[in-house]
């Protein structure tokens, strides 16, 4: 079986009567396959077969137009796998890729036909759920967690992995794809910080916390040069006789805008920010 492009033209006599047809035929099978390959590369993730960011944006525009006409809400989710790097580092990228394909299959099986799931690279998945409010989004998130966390058997290994999910709802949390995805991402990172293996909805407080974290991370890069860090020495006393036997050196940071920053806040930021 092959695909053929054919141009057919009539052959006429002097009086205009058609006597024959002339056909020029060309086998365009390879050309069609190349076009399909280009289409796939442009719109789909090559590992999982899921839509990529380009196609996700197109699907969102369509879902947004429906939501605007109907007055319905629209849910956007950001799903990230917990400790996925450990699997790549210990068992290899080939097995890691197989796990990603399995997770993609499980996510698709959980969603409706009108929903869209996209892989953005690594272990990050973005979901668009048209006509879905907060209650519906919570229900879907719970189903996703139950599906993704099921053990996966491959060869000698039985793997279990958990997801962290952030949720943003149109129109309250944003009216465009960039804002909604950013806010869903913020909610997902809050899950990572607190517990993992859970889901959370975006709140304005999260945005404020995220902005403060970014400011502190940037400020830390210049804190030493600007003489904003000090050492405080806390004496260590002997329980037996009460005399000083040593001291613990504790770092303190006086931020020019936020004042004294607790080490409990800025040390994790320093570790995460490199």
Image (cartoon, rainbow, N blue to C red):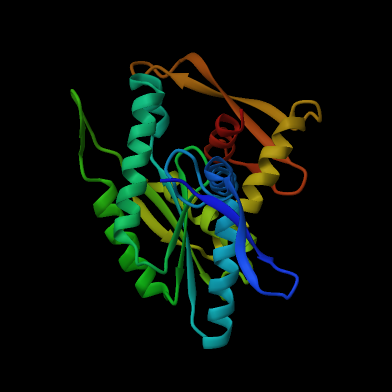
Q: Residue furthest right?
A: 226
Quarter of image, res 242: top left
In the rendered image, the quadrant that contains the C terminus is: top right
Q: Residue at position x 67%, y 38% from top?
A: 217
Quarter of image, res 260: top right
Q: Residue 100: horizontal and vertical position, in percent?
A: 37, 39
Question: Does residue 219 appear to the left or right of 274 in the view shown?
Answer: right
Q: Residue at position x 46%, y 20% from top?
A: 236
Q: Residue at position x 38%, y 57% from top?
A: 199
Q: Is residue 252 above or below residue 118?
A: above
The answer, for residue 53, to whether it is visible in the render is: yes
Q: Nearer the viewer, residue 21 or 144?
A: 21
Q: Nearer the viewer, residue 34 or 74?
A: 34
Q: Nearer the viewer, residue 99 or 204?
A: 99
Q: How many marks?
A: 0
Question: Does residue 36 appear to the left or right of 90 in the view shown?
Answer: right
Q: Nearer the viewer, residue 112 or 79?
A: 112
Quarter of image, res 179: bottom right
The answer, for residue 204, to whether it is visible in the render is: no
Q: Residue furthest bottom?
A: 70
Q: Residue 107: horizontal and vertical position, in percent?
A: 34, 53
Q: Residue 65: horizontal and vertical position, in percent?
A: 59, 78
Q: Residue 24: horizontal and vertical position, in percent?
A: 62, 51
Q: Residue at position x 70%, y 49% from top?
A: 258
């Amino acid at each position: 079986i092959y695909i053929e492009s054919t141009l057919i033209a009539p052959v006429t006599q002097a009086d205009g009567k058609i006597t024959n047809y002339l056909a020029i035929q060309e086998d365009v099978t390879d050309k069609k396959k190349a076009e399909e390959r280009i289409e796939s590369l442009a719109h789909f993730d090559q590992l999982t077969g899921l839509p990529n960011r380009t196609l996700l944006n197109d699907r969102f525009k369509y879902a947004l137009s429906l939501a605007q006409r109907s007055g319905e809400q629209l849910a956007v989710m950001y799903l990230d796998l917990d400790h996925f790097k450990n699997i790549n580092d210990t068992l290899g990228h080939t097995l890691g890729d197989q796990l990603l394909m399995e997770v993609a299959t499980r996510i698709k099986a959980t969603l409706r036909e009108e929903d869209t799931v996209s892989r953005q690279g690594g272990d990050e998945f973005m979901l668009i759920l048209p006509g879905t409010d907060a209650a519906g989004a919570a229900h879907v998130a719970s189903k996703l967690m139950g599906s993704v966390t099921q053990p996966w058997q491959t060869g000698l290994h039985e793997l279990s992995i958990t997801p962290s999910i952030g949720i943003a709802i149109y129109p309250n949390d944003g009216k465009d794809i960039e804002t909604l995805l950013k806010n869903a991402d913020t909610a997902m990172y809050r899950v990572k910080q607190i517990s993992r293996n859970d889901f959370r909805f975006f709140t304005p407080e999260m945005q404020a916390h995220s902005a403060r974290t970014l400011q502190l991370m940037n400020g830390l890069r210049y804190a030493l040069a600007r003489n904003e860090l000090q050492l405080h020495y806390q004496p260590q006393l002997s329980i037996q006789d009460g005399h000083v036997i040593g001291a613990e050196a504790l770092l303190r940071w006086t931020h020019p805008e936020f004042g004294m920053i607790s080490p409990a806040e800025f040390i994790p930021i320093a570790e995460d920010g490199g």
